[in-house]
DNA sequence: CTTAAATTGATAATGATTATCAATAAAGGA
DNA sequence: TCCTTTATTGATAATCATTATCAATTTAAG
């Protein structure tokens, strides 16, 4: 049977408290601040289990590095210029029309990753020209 | 300046001829059938350059393995049961409302990865119950 | 035909992730 | 409360895709 451990609770607590979308490295650093004795294999195992359960979202940042996120109500925009990842909230109209377009498949998870140039970088670019 | 080589042409030709979404391993095998002398570093370099140029799409399959695709007019659905990846075509209405929702960001690329249970696996499941 | 520089192929290096395994600790029952 | 079972942990080694290195080759312009 499944057992709750101090380590798991701490790991998920740290991720829940993080507003950014940490990579494994960043997550490890944050966890080490609270309890350096937690092994990195445990962090991997815990996060992977939660991703399977659907509790944690794995975001595919380019370059074989993932980022993690505990909130499921939004999607992600990555600026190709500055590299920052912003949250994107989509209206329920868009989402329902998406799932209608996909019927009769049963959708369990939607990952939308949008790439482009953010407002900030666009304005900077215009000034330079 | 940029130079066209026999290797690059062959690599892109093989990818263009492939209707599936090959991983690097699969792509390497396909290329080796045509010309085994092409080094794998060259395949990586060529594909990476094309991804940067926007000519090739990199699909994030779970597990640190990417898949590649040369056609840009569709998105992807992965069945969590059988693992197959299907193409998903979205109406222009959905796509325009998506980019409207994201203004004033400038969108250069949209990656939509949908996970769920495909029709085939759903029907099998129903019979088993 | 020459030449400069981009590209290639082979190989080593990197870096994230996973597997291994003895030690530890959670949870249920005596 | 104290056992007992077994999931979980931590440390370490192993794996595997990808990237860096570098001499040799090849492209394309003059």
Image (spheres, coloured by chain):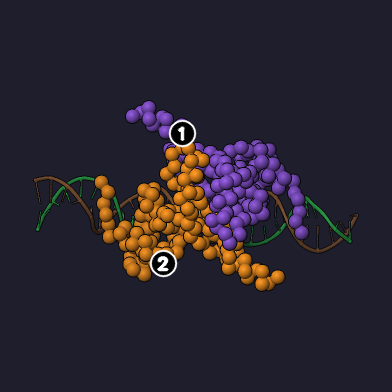
Chain colours: A orange, B purple, C brown, D green
Quarter of the figure with residue D20? bottom right
Quarter of the figure with residue B22? top right
Instruction: Read off the residue under disc 1.
Output: B119
Single out the mark in the foreground, 1 or 2. 1
The single residue placed furthest to the bottom in the displayed view is A127
Task: Report x, y in % for residue B66.
Answer: 54, 48
**Left or right of residue A15, residue C6 in this image:** right
| Quadrant location of the C terminus of chain B in the rendered image | top left
Task: Pick whichever, A86 or D7, lies toward us.
Answer: A86
Q: Are marks 1 and 2 in contact (CB under 8 Å)?
A: no
Instruction: Read off the residue under disc 2.
Output: A29
In the drawing, what numbered circle is on residue A108? none
Can residue B61 be seen at all in this image of the molecule?
no
Task: Pick whichever, B121 or C5, lies toward us.
Answer: B121
Task: Report x, y in % for residue A112.
Answer: 51, 51
**Left or right of residue B111, residue B123 in this image:** left
| Quadrant location of the N terminus of chain B in the rendered image | bottom right
Q: Residue at x 57, y 43 (%)?
A: B91
For the residues beneath circles 1 and 2, the answer to whether they share a chain is no
Q: Residue at x 51, y 62 (%)?
A: A85
Neighbours of disc 1 within 10 Å: few (<14), some (14-19), many (20+)? some
Task: Report x, y in % for residue B103.
Answer: 57, 59
* Chain name for mark 2: A
Residues under labels 1 and 2: Cα distance? 43 Å
On screen, residue A4 above or below B73: below
């Amino acid at each position: 049977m499944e057992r709750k451990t101090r380590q798991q609770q701490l790991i998920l607590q740290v991720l829940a408290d993080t507003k950014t979308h940490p990579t494994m490295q960043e997550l490890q650093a944050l966890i080490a601040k609270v309890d350096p004795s937690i092994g990195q294999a445990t962090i991997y195992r815990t996060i992977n289990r939660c991703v399977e359960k659907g509790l944690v979202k794995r975001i595919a940042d380019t370059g074989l590095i993932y980022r993690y996120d505990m909130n499921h109500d939004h999607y992600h925009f990555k600026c190709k210029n500055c590299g920052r990842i912003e949250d994107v909230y989509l209206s329920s109209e868009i989402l329902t029309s998406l799932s209608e377009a996909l019927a009769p498949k049963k959708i369990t998870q939607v990952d939308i990753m949008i790439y482009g140039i953010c407002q900030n970088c666009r304005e900077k670019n215009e000034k330079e020209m």
